[in-house]
Image: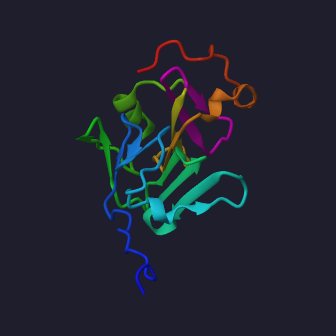
Amino acid sequence: MFGLFKKPTKPPLTSPVVDLARFSLDDLRIGQPVPTDSPYHPHFLPSPDEPGATRYHNPRSGLELTTKDGVVDSIFLALRKFSGRLARDGQPLDIRHESTELEVATEFGEPYWKDVSDPLEVIDFHEFHSGEIEIQFEFPDMCQLEFITILSPGILADPAQRKSYGVTKPWPPSSTP
């Protein structure tokens, strides 16, 4: 009888904290393996599209995480549904889905690149650690922040993507926080 029942696992936190300076969600950090004792660990499912990739997706919470070979490579937030909190170096950050592009720029500075190719959407690309980590702030209605994506490597790390976005600045970015 022993060993027939799986030890219960803690569910993912109901009020997660995403730290935009630490590139983390609670105990998960971009570019680091998922700790086996993380409450998220048992909830990652294999990605049907990519071998070696897994995904945690909870549409009701506005949160999606992906890994590649066990390492966290993206954190995606749909801010209208996101039930957690945003932080910067552990301190509360007053960025929310009603935030404007100016408010985000006040907190994070001017983006490395701004995509305005879609007349109804703006995506601000902020690059960190010489382009190894990217945060995208998306404004689908050109007014209010809707989505935040933290990636490693970022989309703009790919020369073909930089070309498709029309990036004219040097790569990697010369000065990043």
In the rendered image, residue 107 lying in the magenta stretch gets the answer no
Range covered by the magenta-colored residues: 113-131
Going 55% across and 36% down the picture, which residue do you hit? 152
Compared with 151, 175 (above or below) is above
- Res 44 seen here: yes
The quadrant of the rendering that contains the N terminus is bottom left
Residue that protrudes farthest toward the bottom in the picture: 1
Color theme of the render:
rainbow
Q: Position of residue 169 (x, y in %)?
A: 62, 16
Q: Position of residue 17 (x, y in %)?
A: 32, 51
Viewer-proximal residue among 2 and 79: 2
Q: Position of residue 90 (x, y in %)?
A: 25, 39
Compared with 154, 12 (above or below) is below
Viewer-proximal residue among 11 and 69: 69
Going 39% across and 29% down the picture, which residue do you hit? 108
Residue that protrudes farthest toward the left in the picture: 91
In the rendered image, residue 121 lying in the magenta stretch gets the answer yes
Viewer-proximal residue among 107 and 17: 17
Compared with 132, 103 (above or below) is below
Going 71% across and 52% down the picture, which residue do you hit? 50
- Res 99 seen here: no
Q: Quadrant of residue 5?
A: bottom left
Q: Position of residue 80 (x, y in %)?
A: 43, 59
The quadrant of the rendering that contains the C terminus is top left
